Image (cartoon, helix red, strand yellow):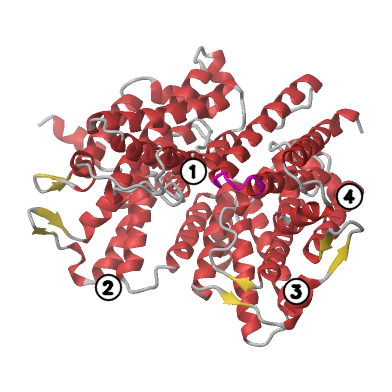
Amino acid sequence: MSTQPTSTAIVQPRSLVTRLRWLAGQRALWPVLALLLILAVNGIVSPGFFNVRIVEGRLFGNVIDILYRATPTALVALGMAIVIGTKGIDLSVGAIIAICGAMMAWRIQAGDPHVVVLLIALATGLLCGLWNGFLVAILNIQPIIATLILMTSGRGIGLMINLLYGGTNPSFESPFLQGLSVGRIGLVPTRLVVFAVVFTALWLLIRKTALGLFVESVGGNSAAADLAGISSRLVKYAAYLLSGLLAAAAGVIIVADTHTSDPVSQGLFVELDAILAVVIGGGSLAGGRIYLGLTVIGALVIQALTTTILTSGLPPEYNLVVKAVVVLAVLLLQSDNARHAVTDIFRRRK
Amino acid sequence: MTRERYLPLLATIVVFAALFITGGLLYKHFFSTLVIGHILADNAFIIIAAIGTTFVILSGGIDLSIGSMIGFVGVCMANLDAVGWHPLASAALMLAFGALFGAAQGFTIDFCKAQPFIITLAGLFLLRGACFMVNLDSVPIRHPFVMAFAGANIPFPTGGFLASSAIVMLVVLAAGIVIAHFTRFGTYVYALGGDSASALLMGVPVRKTIVSVYALGGFYSALAGVIYALYTSSGYPLAGQGNELSAIAAVVLGGTLLTGGVGLVAGTLFGGMILGLISTLINFNGSLNSAWIMISGGVLLFLFIVMQKSLVSSFGFRRAT
């Protein structure tokens, strides 16, 4: 009985208004709201949107399709989120995907076991990350420019690898690698399982070790982090390595899906989508913040938008324009000046 | 100013000369005004866009919307041509549009205190999407003026000629040099790129300068689009894809620091010419794959950035962060 008054005393101030205010303060609100809004619009436009059926032993439906297609972008975006957390940027992820694809096609043609090919592809991504990290962390080159180098030359390197054995856009057959990309485990597409494993591992690495804190402190103020005893070089290096590795993972999924190495167009513009996913998820390009979960939501928002445009019967060409409008809307919401301008207008009316 | 300021430009010219001499030693007929004339004409639109980008980068920003602008301008000009507009009239309209679009980007960047990278990325999406919304196919421009423009040139004494697109490029390059080095606006741009906080304290009108810089960038990339459309006499919605990177590479090869505040507009001409020279050399060889163009571009970019870094540290240029 004696506990009764204390519990009411705690509950009392939590009126609806304070709860709403608490909710509005949550940074997860906007991206999640955007995703729900897009899904709701879809549900209204096409009534069967949320139906999930089982066709040929696998889950099938629009929502599953969004998850399925968003996976490569989400993988790349997770790496991008960590790099952006160090106040950097990685423009070369699309080129890394192209190089990994070329490596996979080459090694499969050369007759390597397919598990080894997978490891080679991931190692290639790490190697690319090693190069980017060297430029940014050791030579102190601005991240945009440092990664621009691999971005411009990477697709050329992919073409050169294809030429090593005289192939232009060689195709390959690999039940193992294709299983990773388009197969299923039980009812669930394999790539979603792969993504869940990667995400959990990354979350543990960032949030359950000190690495996340180190990254955020280096991104916030790298000189201060150095004075506090954190080697900002090492942390930046780790970020680019992770980004390269995750881009390679996305590359395996994309290339195994088409089972063709096409360095000119594979992963084209994925860097832009990945950066967009991070920004929609509330990450600031000024560094110092990593939101892994919200970055995934950001990738889902982008894919949901694309799917919406395709299912709503609008020409696919509108996709880019809608994306641009979303970017601008997110930036205006984040900007103090724009918010003040809006509140000023409301005040004047009153 | 100090002599060190001209060192990166000197290095660019040395690399250009070295590449040109290499080409001359390797291939017959390489040492000719014809080759120079072709490099100038083929790369005129990239160099024009890169001159605008030079201003944006000098101010400490970046503009990713260039390639999409080139595509959009071409598509619009082709469609206006189909309804009977004179190419000069549609060109004037597109130049005004380019300046306005750039100004809008600049205003958003300053007003939202947003990263230029993201805002101009939105610009890239917007314009490329707009290209596709106008039409999906390549549309020819059939007005007789286009033929007359393509045919107009100034012959060199030894068989080569300066094509009309190259003439336009040299004229706007001269205009760019005047704006950068002989106007108050130019000084503002350097001040802003060098240290925006000090620039603000010294009374540089920051918002006006940023809006003008991006308007200038938009104008130059729209002009690049006009030249490209006239040169190819068509409008194609995928035209110019990735050209923003070539333009940025040309600026970096030209000796301008990406951190802003250091660099010369004239260097961009040589930066763009180096890129053109590489692809000409590879075309002259004939047996080399086009993949080499991408790779050698990347290698050269890397070498220049490292060279700039060592110059910066040995002569104590202060880096703006």
x and y percentages locating residue A130 in the rendered image:
47, 25
Residue A155, disc: 1
Q: Which residue is mark 3?
A: B92
Q: Are marks 2 and 1 on the same chain?
A: yes
Residue A124 sits in quarter: top left
Q: Determine the CA span between mark 1 and mark 3.
A: 37 Å
Residue B213 in view in this figure:
yes
The quadrant in which the N terminus of chain B is found is top right
Which numbered disc, 3 or 4, marks the residue closer to the eye?
3
Task: Count neighbours of disc 3 (C-alpha within 10 A) and say few if under 14, some if 14 to 19, many if 20 or more.
Answer: some
Left-right relation of B175 to A112: right
Amino acid type, callout 2: Val
In the rendered image, the vertical position of residue B152 relative to residue B156, given as above or below: below
Task: Give the residues drawn in magenta, as a range.
Answer: B284-290
Q: Determine the CA span between mark 2 and mark 3.
A: 42 Å
Q: Determine the CA span between mark 2 and mark 4.
A: 56 Å
**In the structure shown, which secondary structural element does the residue marked by tag 2 occupy?**
helix
Task: Count neighbours of disc 1 (C-alpha within 10 A) and say few if under 14, some if 14 to 19, many if 20 or more.
Answer: many
Chain identity of mark 3: B
Residue A45, disc: 2
Which numbered disc, 1 or 3, marks the residue closer to the eye?
1
Mark 2 near mark 3, Cβ–Cβ under 8 Å?
no
